[in-house]
Amino acid sequence: MKAHLTRRYLFSASHRLHCDGLSESENQATYGKCNNPHGHGHNYALEVTVSGQVNPQTGMVCNLVDLDGAVHREVLERFDHVNLNARREFAATVPTTENLSEVIFNILKQRFTAAHLEEVRLEETMMNSFEYAGGAELRV
């Protein structure tokens, strides 16, 4: 039997949406208040969905301790309470939540192999959330 498991994690981070390839007026027109030179922050809710065969002995898709450990070690310790613009992952990329979703997915895809990583969903605000499932188009 194949099943899906989704776990939810919370973290806070700040960012400034700014593209060096655009003029100041283009950045302002594109990103609006999110282009504030001092940045702004979000309380993100991250949902990680994995799938796999249910282990007949444990009754689980994967060990939750392993999943939680991977997410804490690879994502939360890296991004919680940081300025995303200062992270090497965004040295050449605007740290939009769309891009952050892809970065998180790719990190977990490499580091967590106990179950198949289906997708990550990142809620930026009550009104905005983004899903990324690798290679597929980002759904907003």
Image (tube, grey):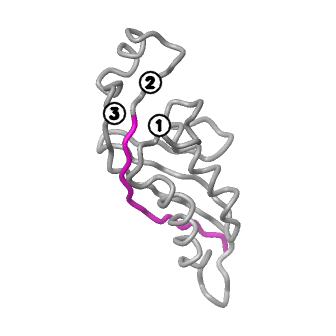
Q: Quadrant of residue 88?
A: top right
- Tag on residue 119? none
In front here: 74 or 59?
74
Image coordinates for residue 52, horizontal then vertical, percent: 67, 69
Q: Main secondary structure of the magenta part?
A: strand
Q: Secondary structure at mark 2?
A: loop
Neighbour tally class for label 2: few under 14, some 14-19, many 20 plus, Cα within 10 Å = many
Image coordinates for residue 101, horizontal then vertical, percent: 53, 44
Mark 3 near mark 2, Cβ–Cβ under 8 Å?
A: no
Mark 3 near mark 1, Cβ–Cβ under 8 Å?
A: yes
Q: Secondary structure at mark 1?
A: helix
Task: Decide which of tag 3 and tag 2 comes sooner along the chain.
Answer: 2
Tell me the residue that label 3 is attached to: 39
Image coordinates for residue 129, horizontal then vertical, percent: 41, 43
Q: Determine the residue positioned at 44% across, 55% down.
A: 46
Give the amino acid type for the residue marked by disc 3 in the picture.
Gly
Residue 69 on the magenta segment: no
Mark 2 near mark 1, Cβ–Cβ under 8 Å?
A: yes
Tell me the residue that label 1 is attached to: 85
Give the amino acid type for the residue marked by disc 1 in the picture.
Asn
Tell me the residue that label 2 is attached to: 18
Viewed as shown, does residue 65 lie left or right of 123? Answer: right
